[in-house]
Amino acid sequence: MAWLYLFDVHQWLHGDLPNSPPPSSRKKIRNQHWEHLNSMRVLLMPDKWEYPWFAAWDLAIASVPMALVDPAFAKNQLWLMLFEQFQHPNGQLPAYEWDFSDLNPPVHAWAVWRVYNMEKRLHNKTDRNFLETCFHKLLINFTWWTNKVDNHGNNVFEGGFLGLDNIAVVDRSQALPQGEVLEQSDATGWMAMFCLNMMRMALELAGENKAYEGLATKFLQHYVYIGAAMKQMGGRDYQLWDETDGFFYDVLRHPDDSFDKFRVRSLVGLIPLFAVERLEEGWLKPFPSFSANLNWFLANRNHFTQFSCHYLNQGQQSTYLLSVPNQQQIKRLLVRVFDQDEFLSQFGMRSLSKVHAGQPFKYGASEVRYEPAEAESKLKGGNSNWRGPVWFPAGFLMIEALRKLDRALGPTFVLDVVLDDNPYPVAMTLGALARELANRMIRLFVPDAQGHRPIYGADPCFRQDPYWRDHILFHEYFHAETGKGLGASHQTWTALVAALIDEWRR
């Protein structure tokens, strides 16, 4: 849903009536560092009723389904966040209206790269000017991220809020009282994904300008350092990957270097899967500088590359899988994703493992319990809840990761899963699992044998009234056990279902 969004932060802070200025306290609250931001633009809004204001990662994600119908508008939306009147001079992108300085997941590079490729696939058009102009501004944004949230220079990121509201044990928007630092699996996974998105864009641009090969090398190496940090944490006696549980966890590091591992099985530990690409020897032939740097790095920095750059023996062609988890770890993570008693719902992927219904995680006065619908405990975000329901952005990115992994690992890499009422496990490729997850998410909107759509639950008006039942709503998130739509009812990012239908129902 696109609305005209008018907001001049300087005028809001200082007032527009010289003889009747706003209270002085206004200059000390939110957004006082964003006086350059001046919007007089039509923007994609999260929701036209509940959230008729700007939010960056909502806009980036919503640009993907928008590209199906109007790629020019989708590209314009992505560029606006990088335009000088929005992007901060230090490189940060504004998060959302309530606090531009907060942190959303860095998905903007992913959205730029995906919309670029969607236009190529659907319209046989490659808009390199769009890609290049966005890439330059994303370079500044990437530098801001590394300087801001990797304070110790160890390639493990603190991140903060990251849009997941109350999924965490503690409120990640607030400084911790005793100077603790929360080293986040999701923040670090997002940054690994950011690196790979930038690497792919640089290589695409290097097809016409070889100067970009050096930048592709820079992002490949930065990705490798992040992957190594997640596995070994700079030689310290803990890591984000937990070998016992086969999962990534957040780690709370205390000022005395003692630590607590937050053993919560949630999206936080699955997001590192989203950072995946492959490098094929034949595909890299046009990039001799990048290839030479890759080979040198593999030969001389194996103590880093071994953790996230995995050689695949596929006949006569060398292929490297760029993935933070290795093949064994991928299987261990996906076994949980496709376990109906953990993450797999009839309607997609739960944001928190169902195992926490009976085994809540407790830390001090905090508790994280599986809640399939609205939140009982609200650290942040009103009726927003990431402690169990199905959310479209997370499921969509998991499907993308599975598809990429399937292309890299091939048909011999299978997972034994039990689906629905079938008591026996079935061996499925990662491509088949991606399709299974996509179909479950599409199922939310499809009438059953009685003509009822899961998104409307038991509501008699929407289930039966001919004037309402076919007016589809795009809810913010969905009850993980029934599929009923929850939260805001016009959430633009849930329009991702259109992209799923386009790509999986052909």
Image (cartoon, rainbow, N blue to C red):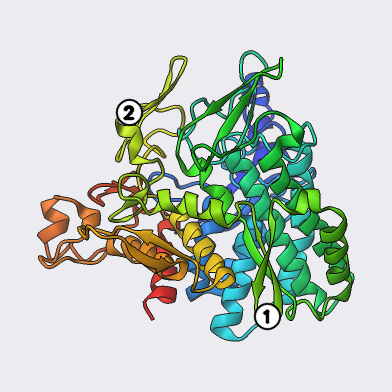
Q: Please name whichever residue, 339 or 60, is drawn nearer the observer in this view of the structure.
A: 339
Q: Residue at (54%, 82%) from the top-left corner?
A: 122
Please state which of the two labelled residues, at mark 2 or mark 1, is closer to the viewer. Answer: 2
Q: Secondary structure at mark 2?
A: loop
- Residue 371 at x, y percent in the picture: 32, 35
Q: Secondary structure at mark 1?
A: loop
> In the rendering, which numbered label is found on residue 376?
2
Q: Is residue 377 above or below residue 282?
A: above
Left or right: 453, with 497 as reference point? left
Report the amino acid beneath label 1.
Answer: Thr
Left or right: 468, with 117 as reference point? left
Extreme bottom residue here? 124
Q: Is residue 314 above or below residue 84?
A: below
Could you tell me if residue 43 is visible in this image?
no
Q: Residues within 10 Å of mark 2 (few under 14, many from 20)?
A: few
Q: Is residue 34 above or below residue 4?
A: above
- Residue 355 at x, y percent in the picture: 34, 37
Q: Please name whichever residue, 192 or 385, is drawn nearer the observer in this view of the structure.
A: 192
Could you tell me if residue 259 is visible in this image?
yes
Q: Residue at (41%, 48%) from the top-left corner?
A: 336
Report the amino acid beneath label 2.
Answer: Glu
